[in-house]
Amino acid sequence: MKEDEIIQLFAKPSHPMLDDCHLFDRNKLLTTDSLSEGTHFRLDWSSPEDIAIKLIEVNVSDIFSSGGIPKFCLLNLGLSSESSKKPWITEFSNAFRKRLELYGIELVGGDTFSSSLTQLSLTLFGELPALNTAWSRSGAKVGDKIYLTGSLGLSHLGWKILSDPNFRILAEKNLKPSSYENKKESNIENEGIIQEAIRKHLRPESVYAKLNKNLMNYKINSAMDITDGLFQDSWKLAKASGKTIQINIDKLTRLGEFLKFMSLDEILGSGEELELLFTSSELLPEKLNAYPIAEIGSVLSTSDKPKVAFTYQDEIYLPKSVGYSHF
């Protein structure tokens, strides 16, 4: 079964689970996300610090994509024979605490257990700013502009560099995954993007800190973060809102730069980007806090059969693949 089909088996027919966050008491938000060894990270690629930051960031991204501010959390640790060793868990806990302090999040409890593979889960509580309403996937309105923060494709490129021998040979001449933060002088062509892609894959970051809450000053009708790629996630937004939407692929930031390394389908299917896809009736600036925001399409109509129409170079674009599937 597909992920969405599994989720809806647990939902009430009258109340389908469409968003990553649950809204309660009008202004309270609740979300949870997990990282599983072998699915979301590999211990030979990712440091304990990488994994700690990623666990927090994927959850902060969910809270922000609902228009909220993260407040406190619960942490569940399923530790393997490797991750329960003192050096590993010490580095993880230090990085975890530092990232919580950065966001002002308080750890209030959790659970720890033994596991054959490392299994990590965070439950994060957030709060809407005073007088603000939550953003949801179902709020897109006809005539809205569709916006996307940042760029797409780097996470998949990072995975290719780490997993494909041809990419990895190029990267390892002067860059090693365990020390990708330490930029060195070298004669590798495109070294900068190689380093950037590895970091994006191992340590994705939400746009919460980058946009510094300023996006909340605009009227956002619908929103979600990009975790399964633009192909899948734009369809989720269209379906939740009951709308037909159109996306102009040419408008994506840095598209030409990334096409040197990947196919168009790989870029649009790249997951765990943690960029924000949202709709608004307002005209937003091309940059907010120096971070790019691209207008990539529009909401066309209300429909009993929601769909996403992609165009590329003034022609209809039909993807040959839609990206990663959980099952």
Image (tube, rainbow, N blue to C red):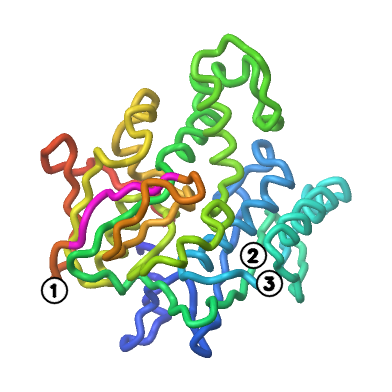
- Residue at the spot of label 2: 121
Q: Which residue lies most toward the right here?
A: 86
Residue 255 spot, x, y in % from top left: 33, 34
Secondary structure mostly seen in the magenta stretch? strand
Nearer-N-terminus badge (2/3): 3
Residue at horizontal 18%, vertical 54%?
246
50 or 283, nearer to the observer: 283
Give whichever of discs 1 and 2 has the lower sequence position.
2
CB atoms at circles 1 and 3 under 8 Å apart?
no
Which of the pair 46/281 is nearer the observer? 281
Which span is picked out in magenta?
292-299
Q: Which residue lies furthest to the left in this view?
A: 315
- Crowd rating for badge 3 (residues with CA inside 10 Å; few <14, some 14–19, many 20+): many
300 up-or-down from 141: above or below = above
Q: What amino acid type is highlighted by mark number 3? A: Cys
Q: Mark 3 points at which residue?
A: 73
Label 1 is placed on what type of residue? Asp
Q: What residue type is labelled 2?
A: Ser
Q: Where does residue 249 sit, x and y in percent of width and height?
A: 25, 42
Q: How far apart are marks 2 and 3 (CA)?
A: 10 Å
In contact (CB < 8 Å): disc 1 and disc 2: no
Q: Name the residue under label 1.
A: 304
Quarter of the N terminus within the rendering? bottom left
Residue density around tag 2, few if under 14, some if 14–19, many if 20 or more, within 10 Å: many
Please tell me whether mark 2 sits on a helix, a strand or a loop.
Answer: strand
Counting residues from the start of the chain, the first of labels 1 and 3 encountered is 3
Q: In this orientation, does residue 4 appear?
A: no
